[in-house]
Image (spheres, helix red, strand yellow):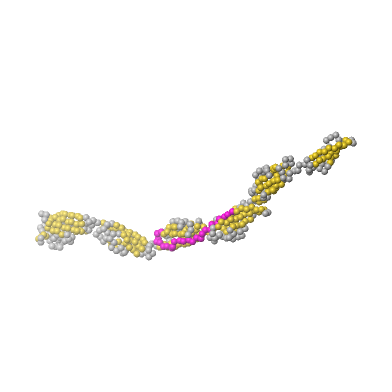
Amino acid sequence: TGTGSSYFWYPGNSLSSSFGSTVFANPSATQVYTVVAALNSCTAQALVTVSAIPIPTVVAMASESIVCSGGSTSITASGANSFQWLPVNTLNTSVGSAVIATPNSSTTYTIKGFNGVCTGTGSILIKTVERPNMKIDGSSAEVCKGGTVSLVASGAQFYIWEPATALGSPSFSSQVVANPSVSTNYTVYGTNSSGLSSCNQQLSYSIIVVPEIIPSVSSNTSLCYGQKTTLYASGGNTYSWSPARGLNATQMSAVVASPTVTTEYTVQVSRNSRCGVETRVLVIVNPVPEVDAGRDTTFNLDEVAQISARGTGTLTWIYGDGIACPGCPETQVFPERSGCYRIEAVNAEGCKASDEVCLEITSDYAVYIPNSFTPNGDGLNDSFLVFGRGISATSLQIFNRWGELIFSSQDPLQGWDGSYKGSHCEPGNYTYVFKYTGLNRKKHTKAGSIYLAR
């Protein structure tokens, strides 16, 4: 400003204009400007110095310009005295010359640099490669020896499987078919790639190879109808028997079989219900013989007791008192008390059946003593004789009116003929004493009067 009527500025290459009282200077370096003022025919000049402070040139360098999503890289800025970073949500700090960036996707970071007066701006692009997010789907975690398992990996661009042995397809495919001979842990390495950078992930899948099952089962067996037998199987840890009829269980290694007809049982031997192998066992059911011991009967002790059985096979009396012929279906027995007799039938297959008959043994007996007799020699009622049934150990005594013993006999067939010492006794009453043992083995005595008539 001044009192001139016109003004001229130089050098004018960094000025907005060379004329005017007010101009704008934009020097690239410190510059001295001269202004000449004119008024009428007079001139005057003045100098002004404009200092130019350079704008900071902000430069950023990253330890890795391409990272996996969620990965980190160090970024360092230079070219200014202080710095401010944007965006801040994936940086560990927003100020300073060094930061750590953890971008989830490709991100351009802006850096403002300050030198105290002027501000410069820089930027840097950090690219991201999507990290693999893999999973493995397997058709089974167990396989029978010689079997296969299909393995499918997903969530990456490229795959490599290890170990490559026992794989039925290329080991770099997303889907492979494993045929391991022993339990194996397969690892798949997944890669996502962008240019020269890649991100990796690995997963494992274990396949258990079930050992070869060699089943074992009980030998074929035979039994009689109504009997039971235990069947055993081995070679695994799970079992399934069929058919179920005649079995007490179907899911155990040992089962009790009681079939009513000849049956072939199948047992599937497996390990954890896998890789089952079948084997069979035959249970032959033989018929049992028929036997009938007869009807229960009552006999008196003094009667002949006979038992008679019928049936098939070999018949043998195996229980009872006083059996005359145990091997005879029909035999005499000599029981002393009531009881039962059992007969057993055995057929050609060794099957047995039995039945029993029970006998009730009575001890009934009877004694008949006449009250008179006529020893006159006419052959009728000539002797005094006691009659009895079922008695033994008899004794007969005759006494006269004065109590004198005139006759005595222990022979049940010998009676008193009415004489004493070879002479006929007088008609009249005489006393008798009869002693005997009954079928119940008890001793008895009977006494009374007998009339002798001529």
Q: Is residue 240 left or right of residue 69?
A: left
Does 133 appear in magenta? no
Query: Residue 373 location in percent, x, y?
Result: 14, 58
Q: 393 or 174: which is nearer to us? A: 174
Query: Residue 214 location in percent, x, y?
Result: 49, 61
Q: Quadrant of residue 138?
A: bottom right
Q: What is the span of residues highlighted in magenta in the rendered image? A: 203-228
- The residue under the point 36% across, 61% down is 353
Residue with the most extreme right position: 41
Q: 366 or 281: which is nearer to us? A: 281
Where 49 sits versus 183, above or below?
A: above
Q: Is residue 411 visible?
A: yes
Q: 318 or 186: which is nearer to us? A: 186
Query: Residue 360 location in percent, x, y?
Result: 28, 57
* Quadrant housing the C terminus: bottom left
Does 221 appear in magenta? yes
* Quadrant housing the N terminus: top right
- The residue under the point 56% across, 60% down is 179
Q: Is residue 240 visible?
A: no
